[in-house]
Image (spheres, rainbow, N blue to C red):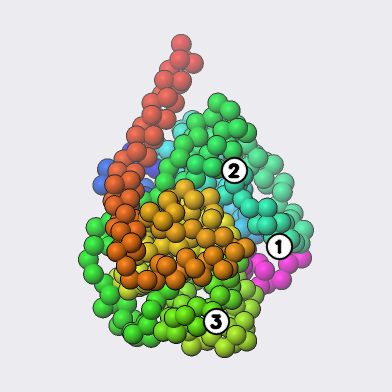
Amino acid sequence: MRVVHLLRKYDPAQWGGTETAMQRLLEGLRVHGVRSAIYCPALDSVPGRDPLRDAGGEVQRFRAFLPVLGISAQTRRQLVSVGGNLMSFDLISLLRRETDMSVLHAHALGRIGGIGLSIARQRNIPFVVTIHGGVLDLPPQLKKEMRKRAGGWEWGRFFGWIFQSHRLFPDADAILTCNGVEAALLREKYPGKRILVQPHGVPVGAYEEQHGGCALGAFPQIRGRRVLLCVGRIDPVKNQAWLVERLPRILQSHPDALLVLTGACTDEVYGEALRRRMRALGVENAVLFTGGLPPNDPRLIGLMQQAEAVLVPSISETFGLVILEAWAAGTTVLSSRTSGGRTLIRHGENGWLFDLDDPDGFHETLDRALHRSDRVRDVRLCGMDTVRTEYDVVALAGRMKRLYEELIEEKHALRHSTRR
């Protein structure tokens, strides 16, 4: 079986949750004998190490463009970096030349997903679409911000009509989401569709080896500090600014605290504003930017193992892969009450939840989590047990392979019935 995966962004230098989920899916599928090809937009420069290729994927780059006029170069770079609604003629020709394709699996919506749907229809092969972020399950604040950010004149809507991008969900053979709330909303909107919850997984074994020395060697600033780790791209949705605002009060109670922000900056304006605010608050020496680190990187695992707590202040987090990673590393997790956080965390049992509009409650919870007690140890152990028993990456990939096999069989059966 050979599965072609479509991505609307993939830059090893700007690693994020989608890329991490993809790498682990490919690793798990390889264990089950599934061959994977990844089609993704070309980059200005050729990356050195390619984690998806290392995971066993055949990476194919296609030329793509953003069909929007009247936006600044900075805005264009930002939209492309987060996987804006791209268009590609190159992808069409490349997919048409594919001779050995059992399933077409789109991890992209919009025009790129529409192109995949059109090719899958022509080939009469299963088309699967995965929602890595949110579509229906998005906070009103984020929806408003997304509309506000949109600008310029999008002259590429014609291509979306040609490739029936609006038919992506109605015509897909299966829709996958990592979020139960999103799945319920989709089932309500598309009754009768095959809509499944497929959580992301973690290679637990990679987190059992101790990598604290790697983290200390790469980031000596953490030595002797109480590390509060926040992993995610530097972006308003990930909401690192909320933590920076809380930092002066954190330092009053925990003067040796160090806020470590790990992730590539995908919003230049936000990143610059974040640094200005740090200077205004006088907390520059209590914040460390590490840049993006790929999954399974000993430096990242070591940071999680060294951290007193992993903080997830996101405005929207439809799953929360970093929560699983923190659990695998044996670290306490505090998350905002996103749909992903609420799905994974049982408050006070395997982690803690907090409200973004209740800073006092956050500080009380953080103080509790930083108190070295038997209760905190039990919460950490419960998190470790949760990820080991429910989110093993190989087991989840096996479930994905079985879905592919079912869809292929259904296509074969339908083809034979129509021939009669």
Residue lying farthest top?
Answer: 420
For disc 3, the marked residue is 248
Q: In which image quadrant can residue 350 be found?
A: bottom left
Tell me which secondary structure the magenta stretch mostly adopts.
Answer: helix
Q: Answer above or below: position of 131 versus 1.
A: below
> Measured along the vertical axis of the image, is residue 398 above or below residue 27?
above
* Front one among 207 and 96: 207
**Rendering coords of residue 145 (x, y %):** 69, 60
Q: Secondary structure at mark 3?
A: helix
Say which residue appears at 36% left-offset and 32% top-offset: 405
Residue highlighted by disc 2: 114
Under mark 1, the amino acid is Arg
Residue drawn at (49%, 50%) of the image:
342
**Residue 136 highlighted magenta (yes or no):** no
Disc 3 versus disc 1: distance between alpha carbons? 30 Å
Residue type for callout 2: Gly
Q: Quadrant of residue 77?
A: bottom right
Image spot of residue 138 (x, y percent): 61, 50
Q: Which residue does the image show at 61% across and 58% down from the upper left?
A: 84
